[in-house]
Amino acid sequence: MKQHYKKNIFQRFSMPLEELGIYYREQRKLHFEHKEPVHGIVWRKRLHPALKGLLRILHKLNKQTILILKDQYIPTNRPLIYACTHIGHDDIEVISTAVRKHSFLFWGDPRENYRRLPGFFLYLKGVICCDTAVKSDRKIGKETCIKLLRQGGNLQIFPEGAWNITENLPVLPLFPGTAEMAIRTGAEIVPIAIDQYENNFLLCIGKNIDGSRWDLSRKQELTDLLRDQLATLK
């Protein structure tokens, strides 16, 4: 079996992008096989208020406004999964600014932001990556999210899996991974709908859905409930 040693930052900057994507995927596989915990939860939670402050400044510089039309979130000490609709590039920053608690982002196909400033921001925020075209990496990504939640971290995820740019469908069909994560960890799902009108972002935050009240045999039923709630909020 080929050994994949960890490259320093200078080596990573000189690698072709496709090769770098393979390198990071192999590193994720090694971490998974060695059953390593998710690192950096505590210091990222402490950094969260400063990052939110920086994001607010950036929103003002970009003349962006964020308006929360409805907030039904119920405070809890349980791990949270922020399950959000997806409309464009700015969703991650807008939702990170709007919600109360720190969360790691579950991010598919991350190569576009390797070695770029947005990628560094996501590193500070905390990100769990996977290449969605690779089945084994999707599994590693899902199991790493479950590990994060069991360690007391929170997760931000876009269960539609792609931008919804359709005109007549408020919410695309959801992947069932969000429901499975909530059921297996007892996390609470917080549905969030987002929309954009030029530089104005509107959000509706729904009531928590308690994953501990469901079992895996009802995973699709929970997925359908989440989609219905997101559509209502949208």
Image: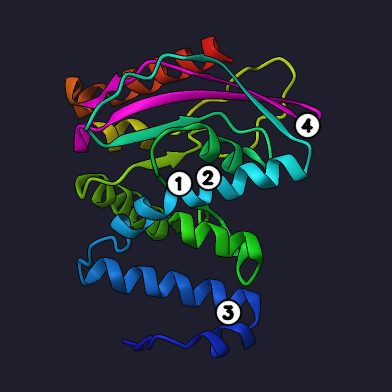
> Which label lies toward us, 1 or 4?
1
Q: Which contiguous range is marked in magenta?
A: 183-211
Q: Position of residue 192 (x, y in %)?
A: 50, 24
Mark positioned earlier in the residue sequence (3 or 4): 3
Q: Which residue is mark 4?
A: 199
> Which label lies toward us, 2 or 4?
2
The amino acid type, in three-letter code, at marker 3 is Glu
Asked if the magenta segment contains residue 199, the reply would be yes
Mark positioned earlier in the residue sequence (3 or 1): 3
- Marks 1 and 4 sit apart, C-alpha to C-alpha, by 23 Å
Q: Residue furthest top?
A: 232
> Which label lies toward us, 3 or 1?
1
- Marks 2 and 4 sit apart, C-alpha to C-alpha, by 18 Å
Q: Which residue is mark 2?
A: 52
The amino acid type, in three-letter code, at marker 1 is Pro
Mark 4 residue element = loop
Q: Position of residue 151 (x, y in %)?
A: 21, 50
Q: Which residue is mark 3?
A: 19
Secondary structure mainly formed by the magenta segment: strand
Mark 1 residue element = helix
Mark positioned earlier in the residue sequence (3 or 2): 3
Q: Relative to 193, is 81 on the left or the right? A: left
Q: Which residue is mark 1?
A: 49
- Mark 2, Cα crowd under 10 Å, few <14 / some 14-19 / many 20+, is many
Q: Residue at x 38, y 59 (%)?
A: 136
